[in-house]
């Protein structure tokens, strides 16, 4: 049974079960001593802390502010105050589930028109979150994961066939584009029995285009003045409506096809089967048709967008560190032996390769932050009083670089940070690429197995050659992705 949560102060547009006002709450409403929290200099009346910021890189702007202002700071934009936390001690305090809960705010709430009360965007008090979590959690058990493994291999074969063609032609590969195709096909096939045919297309599937449009629009709404939004976002609003309609239509077709196949999906036993056929083991409740649509959208979007970014960052760092690549490849060759493809159990034995993945997620967690709100009046870190419902955004990108937890060389890439002895020596709650607490990502083991499997297959098959002129650029669309990353490939001697 999944862990239950107490009804926390909600954030809907009216009021919740606690009677607390819903919707966005500026920090003045919840932090009685807000003046003690530093903010950037040179505030502009009405506009706030806008000097030197870029509307396309709000996360990276906040990272620079954290460097200057310390482990807790605030930003003001268009009359609204936001509190950010980047220090390990304060983030650990916010991870206390007895005092804090998930806060659905900022860009996440902007996704509710399409994802509603899906697992990622549900408010704590909405009953469908716990219902869906309890029904779907067995879909990520060890037995279920072993069942997904052959499908993951099949999609990986499509990727390597494409990369073989590019290598033979002497062409570079578009890493983020191909990782997006891979992860979309993987979650679609393993979770919902659907094939988008991504590798048969020169351009991204329209589902990906609509998804990127929706994520980008959600982030853009964060940086547009509310009073000017209807004017400045008029055209973007229409495009976003079309994107959401396409996402809904696509998912409705997937669900209708499954129902037409016999209602239970012909015994496929995947996530969609569970959504359609499984009742809650205690209450007998089932997911409604509307909530099923929202959960499918949530899994298709969140289930591939973050994993594709994680794979892309890992491949970038491997291409820049030949010593790390050689060590990881030697491990793959040793663990997998003469087997052309690994069995399910062999993937978990790639412990060093998993360290590479974790270190990539440390430097660039593709879900770069998470918000937490106070269940009751409390004091953060013994210093900053918070009223019930007050919230803060934890910058995972900076938490993962806090020298107090990671050392003075925290900005450097070093997979041995995740050696067992190093992990044991670190404080708890300093590595949070999947969020924290009861509302942490339900599919994290799925994502880690998929990513480790794919990296192992690629290292066994190819040499990776970085573009010497490329400097890492980060594309922000609520999630993070390397921008413009390409690699040239060399086929390893003797690779199957």
Image (cartoon, rainbow, N blue to C red):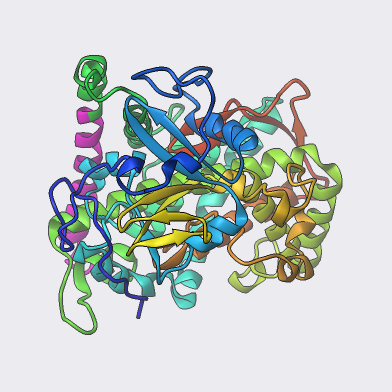
Write the residue at 33% across / 41% down.
28
**Drawn side of residue 80 relative to residue 464, left or right:** left
Is residue 288 covered in magenta? no
What x and y, as percent, mark residue 164?
Answer: 65, 38
Write the residue at 22% across / 74% down.
278
Write the residue at 22% across / 44% down.
23
Region of the chain picked out in magenta, as a range: 241-265
Residue 161 drawn above or below residue 243: below
State the residue in front, 315 or 459.
Answer: 315
Please identify the residue farthest to the bottom as the structure is shown: 282
Residue 281 drawn above or below residue 310: below
State the residue in front, 398 or 314.
Answer: 398
What x and y, as percent, mark residue 449?
Answer: 57, 62
* Quarter in which the N terminus is drawn: bottom left
What x and y, as percent, mark residue 446?
Answer: 49, 62
Q: Quadrant of residue 471?
A: top right
Residue 350 drawn above or below residue 10: below
Q: Main secondary structure of the magenta part?
A: helix
Residue 203 drawn above or below residue 281: above
């Amino acid at each position: 049974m999944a862990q239950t949560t107490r009804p926390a102060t909600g954030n809907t547009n009216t009021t919740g079960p606690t009677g607390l006002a819903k919707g966005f709450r500026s920090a003045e409403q919840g932090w009685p001593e807000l003046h003690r929290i530093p903010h950037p200099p040179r505030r502009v009346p009405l506009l706030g802390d806008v000097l030197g910021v870029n509307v396309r890189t709000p996360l990276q702007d906040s990272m620079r502010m954290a460097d200057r202002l310390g482990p807790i700071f605030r930003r003001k934009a268009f009359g609204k105050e936001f509190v950010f936390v980047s220090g390990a001690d304060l983030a650990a305090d916010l991870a206390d589930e007895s005092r804090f809960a998930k806060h659905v705010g900022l860009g996440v709430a902007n996704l509710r028109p399409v994802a509603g009360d899906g697992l990622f965007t549900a408010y704590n008090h909405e009953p469908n979150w716990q219902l869906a979590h309890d029904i779907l959690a067995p879909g990520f058990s060890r037995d279920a994961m072993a069942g997904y493994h052959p499908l993951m291999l099949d999609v990986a074969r499509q990727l390597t066939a494409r990369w073989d063609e590019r290598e033979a032609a002497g062409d570079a590969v578009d890493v983020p584009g191909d990782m997006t195709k891979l992860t979309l096909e993987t979650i679609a096939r393993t979770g919902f029995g659907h094939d988008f045919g991504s590798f048969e297309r020169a351009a991204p599937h329209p589902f990906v285009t609509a998804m990127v449009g929706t994520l980008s629009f959600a982030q853009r709404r964060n940086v547009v003045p509310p009073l000017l939004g209807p004017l400045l976002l008029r055209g973007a609003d229409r495009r976003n409506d079309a994107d959401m309609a396409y996402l809904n239509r696509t998912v409705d077709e997937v669900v209708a096809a499954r129902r037409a196949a016999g209602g239970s999906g012909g015994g496929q036993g995947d996530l969609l089967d569970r959504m359609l056929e499984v009742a809650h083991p205690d209450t007998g409740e089932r997911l409604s048709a509307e909530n099923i649509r929202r959960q499918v959208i949530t899994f298709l979007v969140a289930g591939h967008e973050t994993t594709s970014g994680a794979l892309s960052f890992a491949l970038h760092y491997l291409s820049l560190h030949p010593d790390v690549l050689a060590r990881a490849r030697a491990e793959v060759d040793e663990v997998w032996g003469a087997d052309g493809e690994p069995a399910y159990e062999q993937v978990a034995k790639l412990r060093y390769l998993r360290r590479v993945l974790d270190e990539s997620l440390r430097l660039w967690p593709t879900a770069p932050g998470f918000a937490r709100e106070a269940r009751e009046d409390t004091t953060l870190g013994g210093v900053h009083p918070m009223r019930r419902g007050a919230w803060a955004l934890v910058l995972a990108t900076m938490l993962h670089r806090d020298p107090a937890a990671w050392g003075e060389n925290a900005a450097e890439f070093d997979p041995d940070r995740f050696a067992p002895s190093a992990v044991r020596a670190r404080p708890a709650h300093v590595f949070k690429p999947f969020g924290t607490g009861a509302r942490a990502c339900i599919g994290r083991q799925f994502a880690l197995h998929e990513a480790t499997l794919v990296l192992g297959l690629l290292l066994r098959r190819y040499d990776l050659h970085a573009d010497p002129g490329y400097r890492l650029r980060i594309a922000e669309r609520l999630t993070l992705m390397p921008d413009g990353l390409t690699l040239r490939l060399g086929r390893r001697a003797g690779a199957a």
